[in-house]
Structure formats: C-alpha cells, structure tokens
Image (cartoon, rainbow, N blue to C red):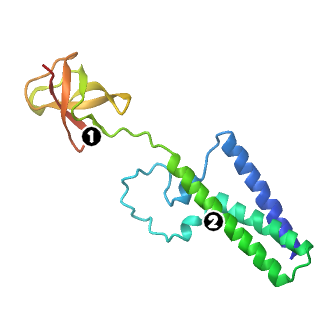
C-alpha cells in the first residue's frame, strides 16, 4: 500500500505544482469547470445539458490532483506512525476528500470573481450618444452611434422611429430591441 500512497503523493503533487506555476504565469485556469459551465457560456444560459448533481461539480483537474496529493501524503504519514491498515486507509481517504472539497469551494469562489466584461445595451436607455453613421428615417435601415455604456465607449446599431438623423448629431436612446439595436431620437 506504501507504493500506492507514494505514487499518489508524487504524481498528484507534481501536477499540482505544475498547475500552480501555469496559473501563476497566466496559462489558464480550470475554475469554470468547477461550476459546471464551460468557458464562454453567458450567465443567461438556460442550463440545457448542465443537470449534473452537486457531487459531479466537485471534480476538476485541480480537485482530483489535490485529492491524490493529500491522499498519498496522509497515507504515507499515518503508515509511518504504524497505524492499522484500516485506519491508514480511512485517514488518507478522509484527507483526500476534505482537500477535494476545500479546493472545489476555493475554485468556485474564484470563479465568482471573474468578469465576463459584456456590455448590456439595455443599460443604454436614457443615455446620450453621437451618431457615427447616419440613422435612416422611420426604421428603414440602421445607422451607428457612439456612446458610453457601463463605463465603456461602444459603437452600436441604431434605428429612428421618426426623421433621419445625420452624422454627428447628438441622440438620446429611448429603447433597446432584442437584437441589440438601439432606438434613438435627436437630442434637442
């Protein structure tokens, strides 16, 4: 059994160190898999295909390597203290599960800190902007406006319900359509 503990500690510890170094130097993270979502899915996802139980959400590369590392280390330590084989297996298993749970909670917390950086154009309603490309009259085409939304300058598609709005005119956003098109009117 010593060999199993030694291999778990060595392989798990090595992989854990490599993961830490990669994370330290910005080569990615497995934090999204802890939450059960692949990177790139937005918060409004309907959850189709994401019906795993809470137990399955515990598993990621970090949690599994942490389990193996602590399972091996505690197994070796308790064996060297001449515990019974049953007590050694129990302590090693308990240490591995505790480490797995702790790292899963830690990664879930880190994943919450991430920001998508997406701009929600619904927040543009009521704000002022400037016409970048003329906005045709009565929704007969789309123009473009530049404006500040959520602290960022964005260029958005825009339509007018009334008269044409020329390039350079200041406009106010009066509505947001589902297809990320803003409805604007001239600011007087």
Does 76 sit above or below residue 119?
below
Q: Nearer the viewer, residue 15 or 87?
A: 87
Of mark 1 and mark 2, the one earlier in the sequence is: 2
Task: Tell me if label 1 and label 2 are in contact, CB under 8 Å.
Answer: no
**Does residue 56 appear in this view?**
yes
Where residue 167 appears, x then y in whole percent? 21, 17
Count numbered badges in the picture.
2
Secondary structure at numbered mark 1: helix
Outermost residue toward the top?
168
Q: CA distance from mark 1 to mark 2?
A: 39 Å
Task: Name the image quarter holding residue 163.
Answer: top left
Q: Residue 6's spot in the image, x, y percent?
A: 86, 67
Could you say which quadrant of the image residue 7 lies in? bottom right
**SS for dot 2:** helix
Q: Position of residue 146 (x, y in %)?
A: 29, 24
Kindly identify which residue carries mark 2: 101
In the rendered image, the vertical position of residue 95 relative to residue 125, given as above or below: below
Q: Name the residue at 23% across, 36% down.
A: 181
Q: Which residue is mark 1?
A: 122
Question: Which quadrant, please, contains the N terminus?
Answer: bottom right
Q: Name the residue: 74% across, 49% down.
A: 18
- The front one of 8 and 114 is 114
Q: Give the mark toward the camera: 1 or 2.
A: 2
Question: How many residues crowd around disc 1 within 10 Å: few (fewer than 14), some, or many (20 or more)?
Answer: some
Residue name at image x 19 percent, y 27 percent: 172
If the image is split into quadrants, where does the C terminus sit? top left
| Residue at position x 23%, y 25% in the image | 128
């Amino acid at each position: 059994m010593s060999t199993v503990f030694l291999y778990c500690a060595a392989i798990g510890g090595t992989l854990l160190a490599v993961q830490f170094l990669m994370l330290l130097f910005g080569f990615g993270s497995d934090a999204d898999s802890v939450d059960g979502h692949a990177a790139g899915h937005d918060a409004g996802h309907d959850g189709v295909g994401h019906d795993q139980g809470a137990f399955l959400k515990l598993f990621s590369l970090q949690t599994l390597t942490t389990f193996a590392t602590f399972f091996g280390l505690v197994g070796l330590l308790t064996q060297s203290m001449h515990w019974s084989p049953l007590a050694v297996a129990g302590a090693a298993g308990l240490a591995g599960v505790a480490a797995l749970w702790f790292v899963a909670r830690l990664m879930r917390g880190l994943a919450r800190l991430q920001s998508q950086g997406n701009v929600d154009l619904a927040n543009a309603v009521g704000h002022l902007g400037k016409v970048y490309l003329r906005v045709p009259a009565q929704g007969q085409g789309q123009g473009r406006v530049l404006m500040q939304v959520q602290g960022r300058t964005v260029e958005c598609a825009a339509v007018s319900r009334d008269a044409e709005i020329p390039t350079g005119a200041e406009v106010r956003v009066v509505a947001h359509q589902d297809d990320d098109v803003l409805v604007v009117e001239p600011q007087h």
